[in-house]
Image (tube, rainbow, N blue to C red):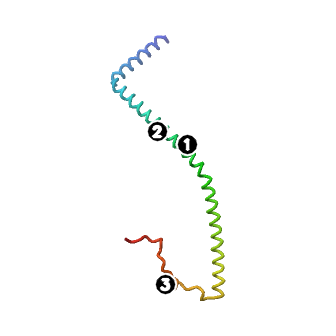
Amino acid sequence: MADSESEVIRSASEEISREFKTLVDSHDLDSLKQSQNLILGRLQDSNAVLSHFNEYSENCFAEVSSDFAKNTRLLRSMKLDLDYIFQKLRSLKTKIMATYPDAFPDNSTIEALDQRPDLELPRSS
């Protein structure tokens, strides 16, 4: 009984596959397969190019990362030095203002004395 049941299932599946084959044209399937192979080739080429670019980028980053780290440390050190310098300047200015109150002009006098252009403002053409 099991053999006859498997025969029935086999013949039914063969009949269904024949019916599916009649629904789809073999020329369309070949065209679809050719398009898929073309797309696969393009994707493989793109993948190769991207892999090469990633390797190149990794090498470039390895070359400049030490320079970036060194320059970052230098900039941090310079910022700390400038912060210290400006702190000392503010302290000296406070001491001078306490000793000589007229040593620094008020805001209206500063605006009259300072005629430099403001580089932060965009130029009007």
Q: Amino acid at mark 3?
A: Ala
Sequence-wise first label, 1 or 3: 1
Q: Amino acid at mark 1?
A: Glu
Would residue 110 be found to the left or right of residue 15 on screen? Answer: right
Q: Which residue was labeled with disc 1? A: 55
Q: Quadrant of residue 86?
A: bottom right
| Residues at marks 1 and 3, CA–CA distance in whole angstroms | 59 Å
Nearest to the observer: residue 99 or residue 6 = 99
Residue 44: x %, y % from top left = 47, 35
Residue in the image at 39% along x and 20% along y: 17
Residue in the image at 50% along x and 82% along y: 111
Sequence-wise first label, 2 or 3: 2
Q: Is mark 2 in CB contact (under 8 Å) with mark 3?
A: no
| Residues at marks 2 and 1, CA–CA distance in whole angstroms | 14 Å
Nearest to the observer: residue 66 or residue 39 = 66
Q: Which residue was labeled with disc 3? A: 112
User: Is label 3 in a helix, a strand or a loop?
Assistant: helix
User: Is label 2 in a helix, a strand or a loop?
Assistant: helix
Residue in the image at 57% along x and 45% along y: 59
Q: Amino acid at mark 2?
A: Ser
Q: Which residue was labeled with disc 2? A: 46
> Would you call the spot at circle 1 few (<14 residues within 10 Å), some (14-19), or many (20 or more)?
few
Would residue 122 be found to the left or right of residue 100 on screen? Answer: left
